[in-house]
Image: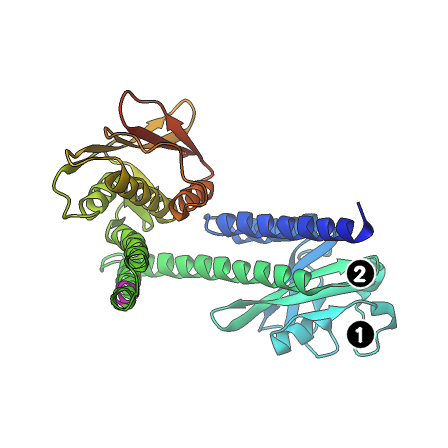
């Protein structure tokens, strides 16, 4: 392998590691973790992926006018929770706070524009990059990587660290919102839950936004030049509608982000090609199955794709039946979402089909797997994915 090919392969591997880390963090960020565990996860993962030993998160303290190190890896005992950094423009994290932009220093010992803190000098830091962590339009703090070896930070590094900081900001905002909602609910225990009002308003606005998207797609569909283009617009509209239906099924009594899966799938299937005459859709699920919204939506989109494919390709003029089932296996801690038809069979999947790619992507989002199971007549597809039982 030539040197150029080796460098290209190394770069692709690095970008792949960055993407995997961001995808994993986007899932972790939606979980109800305490703030200290969330911040520690961030520093550990950034250190692991960038191969930089020293990483820290600093939080802005308005009352003290400084940045406090609230999480970190690779530092001497006593740094995390105690070390502070000033906010002036000669301080790298201070500059990031002031400008709300990344600050990169690749040769700190010979840098004249910035002042090196005692903490960084004691740890032999040579190169660093810090990016602001922003919440709801304000800068909450700074995420910083500090290398003991000279290092050049390229655009990929900046995008990776900035994206990590942005996801962290969203997670912190969610935790802050949930805390405020909980405080409001406790304060107004004898009144209607403030958090429910806020969340229902959020639900309403999301639904309105999705309806706007559908309306826009419908307008574009009318101007499409070919039947194939119009069909593609219709498919996208169906997928957006599947997401909108999930918003309608949000349960505020059992959990603000939970969806009652049986009701959701029945509502979804009743809206898939309602003009069909000879094809019936049956939905069978366990009673009281609740899934978080971010997992229920992929399930619904998978059902939408599989059922639509059966309607289009599985039957002749005589029609038939499509069965959608959802079962769980307590022993294995997983669920099985199955879509089965008694049609003529659709043969092997068409390579490169958008529907197949979407099903694979959604299944990966569920950390699951797609299986084609043999049946006496027709086609049966099962998506298995882990669920807490």
Residue 300 visible in the snapshot: yes
Residue 112 vs residue 221, the one in the foreground: 221
- Residue 268 position, x and y percent, is 23, 46
Q: Residue at x 46, y 48 (%)?
A: 31
Q: Is residue 359 magenta?
A: no
Q: In the rendered view, does 134 fall on the left or right side of 293? A: right
In the figure, is residue 36 to the left or right of 91? left
Q: Nearer the viewer, mark 1 or mark 2?
A: 2
Label 1 neighbour load within 10 Å: few <14, some 14-19, many 20+ = some
Count of number-bearing discs: 2
Q: Is residue 184 above or below residue 45?
A: below
Note whether residue 76 is visible: no
Q: Secondary structure at mark 2?
A: loop
In x, y percent, where is residue 78?
73, 54
| In this view, 290 is above or below 382 | below
Q: Position of residue 142 (x, y in %)?
A: 63, 66
The quadrant the N terminus occupies is top right
Q: Nearer the viewer, residue 142 or 161?
A: 161
- Viewer-nearest residue: 228 or 264: 228
Give whichever of discs 1 and 2 has the lower sequence position: 1
Q: Which disc is residue 151 wearing?
A: 2
Residue underneath mark 1: 115
Q: Which residues are drawn in magenta? A: 211-215
Q: Which mark is residue 54?
A: none
């Amino acid at each position: 392998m030539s040197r150029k090919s080796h460098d290209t392969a190394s770069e692709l591997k690095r970008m792949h590691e960055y993407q995997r880390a961001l995808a994993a963090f986007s899932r972790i960020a939606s979980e109800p973790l305490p703030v200290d565990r969330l911040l520690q996860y961030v520093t550990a993962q950034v250190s692991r992926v960038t191969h930089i030993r020293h990483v820290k998160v600093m939080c802005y303290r308005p009352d003290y006018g400084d940045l406090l190190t609230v999480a970190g890896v690779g530092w001497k005992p006593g740094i995390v929770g105690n070390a502070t950094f000033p906010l002036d423009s000669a301080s790298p994290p201070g500059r990031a706070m002031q400008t709300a932009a990344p600050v990169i220093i690749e040769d700190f010992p010979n840098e004249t524009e910035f002042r090196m803190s005692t903490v960084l000098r004691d740890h032999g830091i040579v190169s660093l990059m810090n990016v602001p962590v922003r919440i709801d339009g304000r800068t909450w703090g700074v995420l910083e990587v500090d290398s003991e070896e000279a290092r050049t930070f390229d655009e990929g590094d900046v995008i990776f660290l900035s994206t990590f900081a942005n996801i962290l900001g969203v997670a912190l905002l969610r935790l802050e919102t949930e805390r405020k909602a909980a405080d409001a609910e406790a304060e107004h225990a004898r009144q209607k839950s403030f958090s429910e009002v806020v969340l229902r308003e959020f639900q309403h606005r999301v639904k309105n936004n999705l309806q706007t998207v559908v309306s826009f797609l419908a307008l574009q569909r009318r101007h499409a030049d070919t039947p194939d283009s119009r069909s593609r617009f219709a498919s996208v509209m169906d997928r957006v509608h599947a997401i909108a239906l999930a918003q309608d099924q949000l349960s505020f009594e059992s959990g603000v982000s939970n969806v009652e899966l049986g009701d959701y799938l029945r509502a979804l299937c009743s809206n898939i090609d309602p003009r069909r005459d000879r094809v019936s859709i049956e939905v069978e699920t366990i009673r009281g199955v609740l899934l978080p919204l971010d997992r229920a939506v992929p399930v619904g989109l998978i059902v939408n794709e599989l059922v639509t494919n059966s309607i289009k390709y599985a039957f002749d003029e005589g029609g038939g039946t499509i069965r959608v089932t959802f079962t769980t296996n307590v022993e294995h801690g997983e669920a099985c979402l199955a879509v089965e038809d008694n049609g003529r069979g659709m043969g092997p999947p068409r390579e490169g089909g958008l529907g197949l790619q979407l099903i694979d992507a959604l299944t990966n989002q569920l950390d699951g797997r797609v299986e084609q199971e043999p049946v006496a007549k027709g086609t049966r597809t099962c998506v298995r994915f882990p669920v807490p039982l």
